[in-house]
Image (spheres, grey):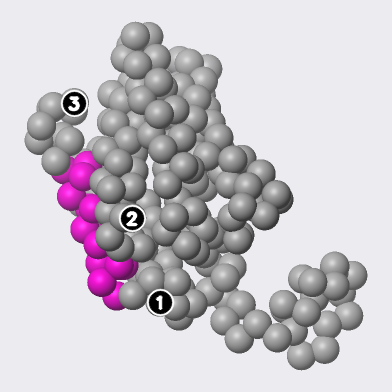
């Protein structure tokens, strides 16, 4: 493929020679931080009576659980401590996951103190539990965070809006699973582990604490 676009040399070379470029694009666009952030904004802000407050709580969630850990990863990549933003080695994930869990716990306390919407509390609590499970699991297996994030969105959507609405996200889940397998970032077992954690955790949280 002959590329004449004014792209940086490294990116132009990747476009020219990358066999599975589509899978890389899918992995970037349907990344866990972006998925959780957009879903939280979509389900909390539009239906809220006080959209300003809803946006604030959703923004706090996005910053604490998604943006802050990724900023740490970006810094570690810059200084050469982590290979790339995908954190391909399991030991590269320990600290970012711990940051997300700690910041998420603080965000949960804030949400409970200021009586945030049950959906924000649900999303925050589920993310903390899922990240804790996957952090522990990382010591034994390279569990797919992509599969976990999107499958948790499927389960949470089913809880909030019904099973029919959840099927909207199923093609995206299948697409991201295929992309991760094509890129050989995970084995089928690791994909399955992430999917099962993502699907069961929201249901378990609802059964345990009865938020909705």
Task: Give residue 109's mark.
Answer: none
State yes or no: discs 1 and 2 in contact (Cβ < 8 Å).
Answer: no
Tell me the quadrant of the picture where the C terminus can be found.
Answer: top left
Give neighbour class at mark 2: few <14, some 14-19, many 20+ (Cα, 10 Å). some
Q: Which residue is the site of mark 2? A: 138
Give neighbour class at mark 1: few <14, some 14-19, many 20+ (Cα, 10 Å). some
Horizontal and vertical percent position of residue 124 = 35, 31
Please report whichever mark, 3 or 1, sits nearer to the chain's N-terminal start.
1
68 or 36, nearer to the observer = 68
Query: From what the image shows, is residue 132 above or below residue 196?
Result: above
Mark pair 3, 1: CA separation: 35 Å
Query: From what the image shows, is residue 120 above or below residue 180?
Result: above
Q: Please give the range of residues in magenta.
A: 188-203
Query: From what the image shows, is residue 192 above or below residue 167?
Result: below
Mark pair 2, 3: CA separation: 29 Å
Please report whichever mark, 2 or 3, sits nearer to the chain's N-terminal start.
2
Does residue 54 appear anywhere in the picture? yes
Q: Residue furthest left?
A: 207
Q: Circle 2 sits in a helix, a strand or a loop, which is it?
A: helix
Horizontal and vertical percent position of residue 117 = 33, 21
Q: Which residue is the site of mark 1? A: 181
> Is 125 colored magenta in this rendering?
no
| Residue at (57, 76) in percent of width and height | 22
């Amino acid at each position: 493929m002959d590329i004449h676009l004014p792209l940086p040399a490294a990116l132009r070379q990747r476009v020219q020679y990358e066999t599975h470029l589509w899978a890389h694009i899918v992995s970037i666009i349907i990344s866990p931080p972006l998925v959780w952030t957009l879903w939280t904004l979509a389900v909390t802000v539009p239906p809220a009576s006080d959209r300003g407050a809803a946006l604030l709580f959703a923004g706090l969630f996005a910053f604490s659980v998604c943006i802050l850990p990724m900023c740490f990863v970006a810094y570690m990549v810059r200084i050469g401590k982590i290979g790339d933003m995908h954190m391909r080695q399991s030991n590269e994930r320990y600290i970012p996951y711990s940051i997300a869990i700690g910041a998420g716990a603080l965000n949960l306390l804030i949400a409970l103190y200021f009586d945030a919407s049950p959906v924000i509390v649900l999303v925050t609590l589920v993310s903390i539990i899922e990240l804790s499970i996957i952090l522990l699991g990382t010591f034994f297996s390279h569990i797919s965070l992509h599969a976990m994030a999107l499958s948790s969105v499927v389960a949470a959507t089913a809880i909030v809006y019904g099973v029919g609405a959840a099927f909207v996200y199923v093609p995206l889940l299948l697409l991201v699973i295929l992309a991760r397998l094509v890129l050989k970032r995970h084995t089928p077992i690791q994909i399955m582990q992430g999917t099962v954690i993502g699907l069961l955790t929201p249901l378990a949280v609802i059964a345990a604490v009865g938020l909705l």
